Amino acid sequence: MSYYRTHNLGELRIENVGERVTLSGWMENVRMVSANLAFVVMRDFYGTTQIVCETEDMIAAIKGINKESTIQVEGVVRERSSKNPKQATGDIEVVPDKITVLGKCRYNELPFEINRSREADEQQRLKYRYLDLRNPEVKDKIVMRCNVVAALRQAMTEHGFLEITTPILTVSSPEGARDYLVPARKHPGKFYALPQAPQQFKQLLMTSGFDKYFQIAPCFRDEDARGDRSPGEFYQLDMEMAFATQEDVFAVIEDVLPPIFAKFGKYDIASKPPFRRVKYLDALETYGSDKPDLRIDLTAKDVTAELSGCGFEPFASGEIKAVDITNCALTRKQIDKLLADCEVQAGVKSYWFKVDETGAIAGGVAKFVADKKDALSAKLNLAPNTLVVLSAGKKTLAQKAAGVAIKTFGANVPGHMDKERYEFCWIVDFPMYEIGEESGELEFCHNPFSMPKGGLETLLKAERGEIDPLTIEADQYDIVCNGIELSSGAVRNHDPEIMVKAFEFVRLGEEDVKAKFPAMYNAFCYGAPPHAGVAPGVDRMVMLLAGVETIREVIPFPMNKNAQDVMMDAPSAVTDKQLEELHIKCVPVE
């Protein structure tokens, strides 16, 4: 028995009637009925209990206490005359004879009503996150996160993986985002970096002879926030396997994730293994995205040959993609609104026409495409009440716009999306290289540590000019759920000779590789096993399971969109003495 309580506030039931109890928690609400009657609702982590004050002393004690103060109540449990079936403790109430303030709330006004905190301004919620977390709806998502992490740990351990922690202070590495740098006091002018991922360390563990590694790994990236991305810090289920192929990794993830999604998710249906495999280029062409939401039955079709000469100027060059949406009852106003939303997301305008109830083409760009109906019918479903959304231009832009249309209209036109399920897929066969948008030169498309398909021979063919480097595929894969990318993974490039050759294509020689990745290069020279891994994001998984729109809802103390912790006032200025110790001087920003 605790000094502060004999029971928690979600525990008492009808069988406790007549017992003397001690309860502690927050005073959620007070309702003064008369000079001799007041109802108090107390709340703790476990639930709520009603307290009924019926004496002048107890009424006087309650009157002097602000809501959200922490109080202790001693009294007797009795049966409620007016029961509340919606409340776990709704059959009883406690009549107190002693009330003690344990932690006084010194403010008469709260920043927001606790039980309605999700309706408050997000900056206020983040500033007073400790109050926001008192809301049971907010708290429950953090509890879910804890349970999901525990389930992940158990599942990985049962599959023979060892949980091994890797360093937080490490070396700057090209992982695709900006590093957070930490000045090294004892080494003037040099910096540690917070790991964007434990990529090199987990590969070194495989080289060290460990067979299966995992951890719930903290990762740090200085990048902008999105709905499914938290700036600064995030966590992932990081795993790596020695002597493993792509299919070995798939088998583990397909065994671990579906039961957890089915158990903890908002929906109790999750894909059964094997998950669908979609080639990267096929995903772009069919779904307009490498993150397709397979709950939606819409796809994109290429109608360039059919419409390029129709006389509509935006269709005169580039490629034209069409998304046909059957049984569409949207009004002209609704269509225009959704197309405007698509334009904001895709950065390019889309167009439309509709097949009316008579089978005639009408609306939008109908006058340009009406005489192409027979040709279009071979590619599209042009049944009555079908809406066709069209995008055009450079291939990548046309694909992206079609992908946005698929997700937008799929979610808003009834019958095209089975929302209440978790649909997984693997995106496979990524390009090894791409032309950088800023540099205009060959760059790694994704992870530079991926093994090129065909190994060294493929790279040598490209070097000899027998194949285009842009056609080289990597043994790399993404796992996607409901249109959200959970993780990238790959079969790793474990051979120093192949690694050096792969980096030569992006203008980095052997000495550069040795300088940038000395530990990994040297370790591989001592004989490394083939190995592969993946790292699904924990925050994104919990976001999907909770059915919320923003990742900040499932992080205990998230930063805002500008990577600021407004509760702790971080980042903050430091003293000149601290900077001197680190051999750093701040200069004004122009």
Image (cartoon, rainbow, N blue to C red):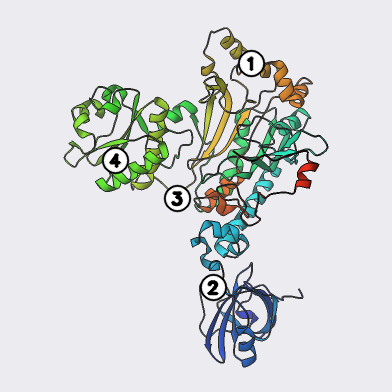
Is the Cβ of the residue at disc 4 closer than 8 Å to that at disc 1?
no
Mark 2 or 1: the one toward you: 1
Is the Cβ of the residue at disc 1 closer than 8 Å to that at disc 3?
no
Amino acid carrying label 4: it is Thr
The residue that label 3 is drawn on is 420
From what the image shows, is residue 58 above or below residue 46? below
Q: Is residue 264 something that shows in the picture?
A: no
Q: Quadrant of the C terminus?
A: top right
Mark 2: secondary structure: loop
Q: Quadrant of residue 41?
A: bottom right
Mark 1 or 3: the one toward you: 1
- Most extreme residue toward the right, as rendered? 186
Q: Dot 2, how many residues are within 10 Å of its Cα: few (below 14), some (14-19), or many (20+)? A: some
Amino acid carrying label 2: it is Gln
Q: Quadrant of residue 486?
A: top right
Q: Quadrant of residue 185?
A: top right
The residue that label 2 is drawn on is 87
The residue that label 4 is drawn on is 326
Mark 4: secondary structure: loop
Question: Marks 2/4: CA distance?
Answer: 45 Å
The first of marks 3 and 2 along the sequence is: 2
Question: Marks 4/3: CA distance?
Answer: 21 Å
Question: Marks 3/2: CA distance?
Answer: 27 Å
Amino acid carrying label 1: it is Glu
The percent position of residue 34, horizontal first and vertical second, equals 52, 90
Q: Which mark is residue 504?
A: 1
The first of marks 1 and 3 along the sequence is: 3
Is 163 left, or right, of 44 in this rendering? right
